[in-house]
Amino acid sequence: MSLRIGGSAVALAVPPRRTLLEALRYDLDLVGTKQGCDKGDCGACTVVVDGVATLACLTLAVEADGKDVCTVETLEGAPHVDALLDGFDRLGGGQCGFCTPGMLMTATALLDRNPRPTRDEIKCAISGNLCRCTGYGKIVDAIELAAKIRRGEAERGVGMPGIEDTPEPLPSNQKSSREGRQGQS
């Protein structure tokens, strides 16, 4: 099978019963996608497949054949950090961090299809992601902030230590570069 992960083409041989979660974590070493309940109850394994938030534990790897898969590893890192990572960091949305990759990917799919979600729409979108810590208030706040950052209504990277001294990312690490590769695959 072949798929694109964060715009990069990947060829992979998997047994027919291998889940997408197992393929990502154990065949491709993308351990950012968390293995939670393995029953689709917690959302920790959420990835984005062709723009749709998808539970990787309930999806066979072969179902992703020919598709675009985004995992938490595909979100842009420092210094031009993804708006969602920025929002979660600034507002404490990460909490213990176990649910965070699934929350981030669910929010990515939400903001990609709805750049101006209401608070209730955010709550509805993340309703399949279980937070085992304290609650969802900071997570919802972080997604609201990320939406504002994406729309240019809030500044990106405020308070990130050392951001003023951070060099420009290598061209291969820029989101626009990764997106450009999608069209070349």
Image (cartoon, helix red, strand yellow):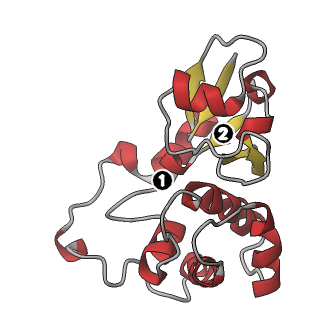
Mark 2 residue type: Val
Mark 2 residue element:
strand
Mark 1 residue element:
helix
Residue 185 appears in the picture as rendered: no
Mark 1 residue type: Lys
Q: Quadrant of the C terminus?
A: top right
Percent coordinates x, y for residue 168 in the rendering = 26, 60
Q: Would you name the residue on which mark 1 appears?
A: 175
- Image point 41% across, 65% down: which residue? 81
Q: Relative to residue 110, is residue 167 drawn left or right?
A: left
Percent coordinates x, y for residue 108 in the rendering = 65, 61
- Relative to 64, residue 87 above or below: below
Q: Quadrant of the N terminus?
A: top right
User: Marks 1/2: CA distance?
Assistant: 15 Å
Nearer the N terminus, badge 1 or badge 2? Answer: 2
- Image point 77% across, 46% down: which residue? 54
- Image point 65% across, 34% down: which residue? 21
Q: Residues within 10 Å of mark 2 (few under 14, many from 20)?
A: many
Question: Quarter-wise, where is residue 71 in the image?
Answer: top right
| Residue 69 marker | 2
- Image point 73% across, 33% down: which residue? 67
Q: Nearer the viewer, residue 185 or 12?
A: 12
Percent coordinates x, y for residue 5 in the rendering = 58, 36
Percent coordinates x, y for residue 104 in the rendering = 60, 61
Question: Quarter-wise, where is residue 9 in the image?
Answer: top right
Q: Nearer the viewer, residue 134 or 67?
A: 134
- Relative to 76, residue 47 above or below: above
Count up the numbered dots: 2
